């Protein structure tokens, strides 16, 4: 959602200015610089097919979750429950597939349906609590974060589950399209493009940004804000559920304790991508970059043997710096 | 009457909790002893197994037994649980305390209230608080992992450690033990450690980066279940099953699958069931005024694809529920 630059006498100038004033330009540039630096420093390791595939595959799960989070934050909301909803959906999905037994496509599809439905259910509950019960998003989703994980722990006794059908983890988790692009990456890409189209090209997307810029104005314009919020949180939950299913495929297990920081990673990616925490401004492309900046940094630092504690420091500094530059550019743009 | 009032709310609270029937106490004069086990955390196969061992032994000895644990492995979760247990005034508390000073105040309160303490699996900073300490030496376990990995890779090549979070005493000790032992193998190059932050996805991506930089990586020591699950996924993604050897620590269902499929070669396994048995024995001895053993060290077992089905090894696989 870049605001068009004021009309300029010459067309080329306008395009240049528009590009220069877009926060996405600077973020993409930062990411490109990182990729170039790491590629020069360790070309054989960083650019190896294996490294690129692994980095993309592991990041896919977070990306799917972050696309949902983009919509939620675009409404000036937040969803802290995504990591727990991911675990809940993965557990329910795996329990269903184990109960059905066998290794067929039907079993995997049933597992997917259960994961998606579990996610939608928690998301819709979040939306209901926020819009109808008027519990602030921070608190509602903090509550469902505990509840969803708690139920997953009750169901499993806190133990990681095995028994993911081979069709799922060998086909999707380890499989590659044309033997090159991991299926998880393809799925994440499809979700991301769909998210971008929905946000920019549909009424649902316009309403989301409208509600985010001012719920009262949206209400007066005739938008059913409550219903729209339930839909948006439902979408966030749906994508957390889908992420849970992808996580099953990737790890061939339902891991209970390993998703406690997913929510903050998703929020950080979305905000780093230029989506405003105050709502009304959001881009999916920004979120993609926001997901990959920390992932690329971590990968590059490990390859370059940066001491492990320094990695944390450096990633923290770069995150804050990237958002600072973004804010700085945005302010100077608004002044001009 | 007291027995029921102690047991019932606990049953309602936690699925895991075992409340044994108690039975007749052959030795106690008027009422059976009450022993409560405070777990390192709830819902973890290691602590569940320790609970099972203690529960079975308590039943044999006619001791009233129950167990409780916090939601994660931290003093913030364990302190309120321990305080709640002290308030119920059991005769003895078996506890897997958080290491360091954090639990010492609450443990001192228990001792002052006349409750006998037994440490199982880990020890708190003030060792004089407990009548007995039962633990496996995690540093020795790490050294055993190093020897196992060295053997798997023919004593040459590059190895790394996938650590959990810096500052957890048990996993830190495993890593230390591994590093000291691996130095004694001149053919092996140690690439250092990465930390997963206890997130399998982070373990996968960091392992992937190390492998990208060292395509001839020969082996990985993964310090606990989260790291084993993450590294195993990375090895499978790289289609390097059996080429990059993984030695893990502890067991879980997904990891046992990885061992069966040849992705993970060896697991260093502790004996939590035995710890539970020993802990109850020591607690009862202390309550009767008999002599106790100050320190008991339980040994490790190395589980592999070839031996995991043997009954004498299979019995060490951690339990997710007591039968």
Image (spheres, coloured by chain):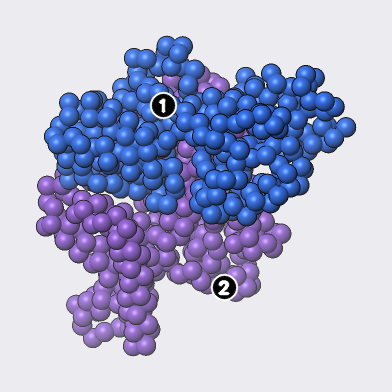
Chain colours: A purple, B blue
Q: In percent of the image, x 68 and y 62: which residue is there?
A: A135
Q: In percent of the image, x 49 and y 17: which residue is there?
A: B315
Q: How far from the left and from the top, in percent, is residue B38?
A: 63, 39
Q: In percent of the image, x 46 and y 57: which residue is there?
A: A264
Q: How far from the left and from the top, in percent, is residue A42?
A: 13, 53
> Would residue A177 appear left or right of B201 to someone viewing this image?
left
Neighbours of disc 2 within 10 Å: few (<14), some (14-19), many (20+): some
**Secondary structure beneath disc 2?**
loop
Q: Which mark is residue B300?
A: 1
Q: CA distance from mark 1 to mark 2?
A: 62 Å
Asked whether the residues under the numbered discs 1 and 2 touch, taking CB atoms below 8 Å apart as contact, a structural biologist would say no
Regarding residue B317, the answer to whether it shows in the image is yes
Q: Residue furthest bottom?
A: A336
**Secondary structure beneath disc 1?**
loop
For the residues beneath circles 1 and 2, the answer to whether they share a chain is: no
Q: How far from the left and from the top, in percent, is residue B279?
A: 60, 30
Q: How far from the left and from the top, in percent, is residue A100?
A: 54, 21
Neighbours of disc 1 within 10 Å: few (<14), some (14-19), many (20+): some
In this rendering, the answer to whether B242 lies above or below A284 is: above
């Amino acid at each position: 959602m870049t605001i068009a630059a004021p009309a300029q006498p010459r067309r080329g100038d306008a395009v240049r200015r528009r590009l220069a004033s877009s926060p996405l330009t600077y973020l993409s540039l930062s990411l490109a610089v990182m990729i170039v630096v790491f590629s020069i420093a360790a070309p054989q390791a960083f650019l190896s097919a294996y490294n690129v595939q692994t980095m993309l595959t592991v990041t896919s799960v977070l990306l799917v979750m972050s696309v949902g989070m983009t919509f939620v934050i675009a409404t000036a909301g937040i969803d802290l429950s995504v990591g727990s909803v991911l675990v809940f959906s993965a557990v329910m999905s795996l329990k269903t597939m184990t109960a059905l037994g066998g290794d067929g496509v039907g079993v995997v599809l049933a597992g997917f349906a259960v994961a998606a439905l579990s996610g939608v259910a928690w998301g819709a509950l979040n939306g209901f609590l926020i819009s109808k019960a008027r519990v602030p998003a921070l608190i509602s989703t903090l509550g469902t974060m505990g509840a969803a994980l708690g139920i997953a722990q009750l169901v499993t006794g806190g133990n990681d589950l095995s028994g993911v059908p081979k069709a799922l983890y060998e086909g999707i988790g380890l499989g590659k399209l044309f033997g090159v692009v991991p299926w998880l990456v393809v799925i994440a890409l499809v979700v991301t493009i769909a998210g971008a189209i929905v946000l920019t090209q549909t009424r649902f997307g316009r309403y989301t940004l409208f509600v985010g810029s001012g719920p009262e104005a949206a209400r007066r314009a005739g938008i059913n804000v409550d219903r729209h919020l339930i839909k948006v949180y439902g979408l966030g939950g749906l994508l957390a559920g889908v992420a849970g299913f992808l996580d099953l495929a990737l790890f061939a297990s339902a891991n209970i304790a390993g998703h406690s920081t997913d929510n903050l990673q998703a929020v950080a990616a979305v905000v780093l991508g230029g989506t405003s925490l105050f709502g009304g401004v959001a881009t999916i492309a920004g979120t993609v970059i926001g997901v990959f900046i920390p992932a690329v940094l971590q990968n590059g630092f490990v390859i370059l043997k940066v001491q492990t504690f320094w990695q944390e420091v450096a990633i923290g500094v770069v995150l804050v710096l990237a958002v600072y530059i973004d804010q700085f550019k945005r302010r100077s743009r608004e002044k001009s | 009457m007291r027995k029921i009032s102690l047991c019932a709310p606990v049953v309602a609270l936690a699925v895991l909790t075992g409340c044994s029937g108690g039975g007749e106490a052959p030795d106690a004069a008027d009422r059976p002893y009450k022993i409560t086990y405070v777990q390192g955390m709830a819902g973890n196969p290691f602590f569940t197994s320790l609970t099972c061992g203690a529960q079975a032994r308590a039943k044999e000895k006619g001791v009233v037994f129950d167990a409780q644990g916090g939601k994660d492995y931290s003093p913030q979760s364990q302190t309120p649980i321990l305080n709640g247990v002290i308030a119920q005034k059991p005769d003895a508390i078996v506890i897997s305390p958080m290491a360091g000073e954090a639990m010492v105040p609450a443990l001192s309160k228990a001792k002052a209230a006349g409750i006998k303490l037994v440490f199982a699996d880990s020890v708190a900073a003030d060792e004089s608080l407990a009548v007995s300490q039962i633990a496996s030496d995690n540093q020795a376990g790490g050294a055993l992992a190093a020897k196992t990995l060295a053997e798997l890779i023919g004593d040459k090549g590059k190895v790394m450690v996938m650590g959990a979070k810096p500052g957890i005493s048990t996993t830190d000790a495993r890593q230390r033990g591994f590093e000291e032992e691996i130095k004694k193998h001149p053919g092996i190059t140690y690439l250092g450690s990465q930390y997963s932050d206890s997130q399998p996805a982070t373990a996968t991506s960091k392992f992937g980066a190390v492998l990208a930089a060292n395509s001839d990586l020969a082996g990985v020591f993964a310090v606990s279940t989260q790291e084993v699950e993450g590294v195993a996924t990375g090895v499978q993604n790289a289609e390097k099953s059996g080429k990059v050897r993984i030695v893990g620590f502890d067991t879980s269902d997904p990891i046992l699958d990885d061992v069966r499929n040849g992705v993970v070669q060896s697991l260093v396994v502790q004996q939590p069931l035995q710890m539970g048995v020993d802990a109850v024995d020591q607690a009862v001895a202390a309550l009767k005024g008999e002599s106790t053993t100050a320190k008991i060290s339980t040994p490790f077992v190395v589980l592999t694809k070839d031996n995991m089905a043997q009954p004498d090894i299979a019995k060490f696989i951690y339990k997710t529920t007591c039968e």
